[in-house]
Amino acid sequence: MRDYHTEQAERAREIYIRSRTPSVDVADWNAALSDAQRSIKQALRASNYLEDVEAAVLADSEHARVFRYMLAPPLSKDQFALCYPIAKRLSRKEKKLALAAAFAQSMRERRTEALAPWLARGRKPSRGELKRFFWSVRPLLAQQQFATAQRNRLARVQESEITTILNANGWVKLPSSLLDIKAALPRKHYMHKTRFATSTTTPQEVDVALGLPNTVVLAMECKVSNDGTNSVKRVNDVLKKAHAWKEHWGSFVKTAAVLQGVINAKDVMRLLDGGVEVFWSHDLSQFEQWLSNNS
């Protein structure tokens, strides 16, 4: 079985490379640039052109992602959390306030004067300053949005293919709700985009939850990776959820991953070693067979 998964990882990589045609990439990049432009405009207006970053983050946490790309250098979400840690024991409201204050602090400490010269002069930005600002920040934000948009689009296709198989095999879709008790999901019923309760963390969202015999639930994660580095992160996401569910539910929850794109073979082995069932988007007949044998 491990040889099979090694072969499928290489097959998935080949399929992904063939799918990255110049015309598709250019269209996705132009869309990412437009989205980035819109996000930056909204963040600037919400913060009164960076005069009040704290208020903007409090109004909409989505602005925080944009502000991270205005720092020198830009910081990932994880890097920002390392540089500006938030105490874990705070209430949800307290964490929101602390995060907003952290972004205001980061903007004071890590913003280059050349990026927003109007702040030091106590005035609104000129048209030329805004133009230079967008030219500086937009490609950085667009690159992140480009990769995310491609993954999300493929992941939605994965989820659609899974639910199509379930519907064709007589499974019944239920409205999504928090799964916090055993037997909450009957056999041969499923939920799309629902949440599982855990004992130590907030409820973890799962792409598709399937009711198996003996009140067991299969938690399926649809994961697409753009490159080898991203492969590590996507697999870590699955393993983190699998650990949280197992700790809370024991053997009553099984975790599965449907993989697509550039997935390192060694990362697939980490999933298998962690007790995760692995399926491939380009070979979903294996999932159908597994479903037939286990439901």
Image (cartoon, rainbow, N blue to C red):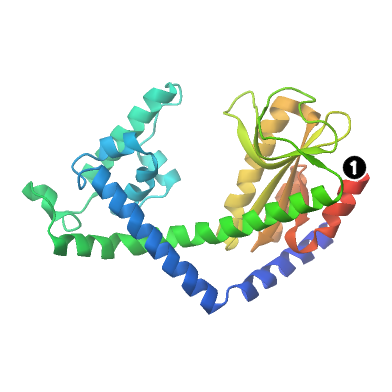
Is residue 73 at all visible to an observer of this figure?
no
Instruction: Write down the quadrant of residue 136 in the picture.
Output: bottom left
Residue at image coords 61%, 51%: 234
Q: Is residue 208 above or below residue 153?
A: above
Quadrant holding the C terminus: top right
Between 247 and 270, the residue placed more toward the observer is 247
Instruction: Write down the quadrant of residue 90 in the picture.
Output: top left
- Residue 119, position as x, y percentages in the image: 13, 48
Quadrant holding the N terminus: bottom right
Residue at image coords 69%, 24%: 180
Q: Is residue 119 above or below residue 286?
A: above
- Position of residue 65 in the picture relative to residue 196 (left or right): left
Q: Is residue 125 above or below residue 21?
A: above
Between 110 and 126, the residue placed more toward the observer is 126
Is residue 184 at all visible to an observer of this figure?
yes
- Residue 12, position as x, y percentages in the image: 71, 66
Q: Is residue 163 above or below residue 217?
A: below
Residue at image coords 66%, 40%: 206
Residue at image coords 33%, 34%: 58
Helix, strand or loop for disc 1: helix
- Residue 228, position as x, y percentages in the image: 59, 62
- Position of residue 16 in the picture relative to residue 285 (left or right): left
Instruction: Write down the quadrant of residue 220 in the picture.
Output: top right
- Residue 55, position as x, y percentages in the image: 27, 35
- Residue to which mark 1 is pinned: 294
Residue extending farthest right: 293
Between 195 and 164, the residue placed more toward the observer is 164
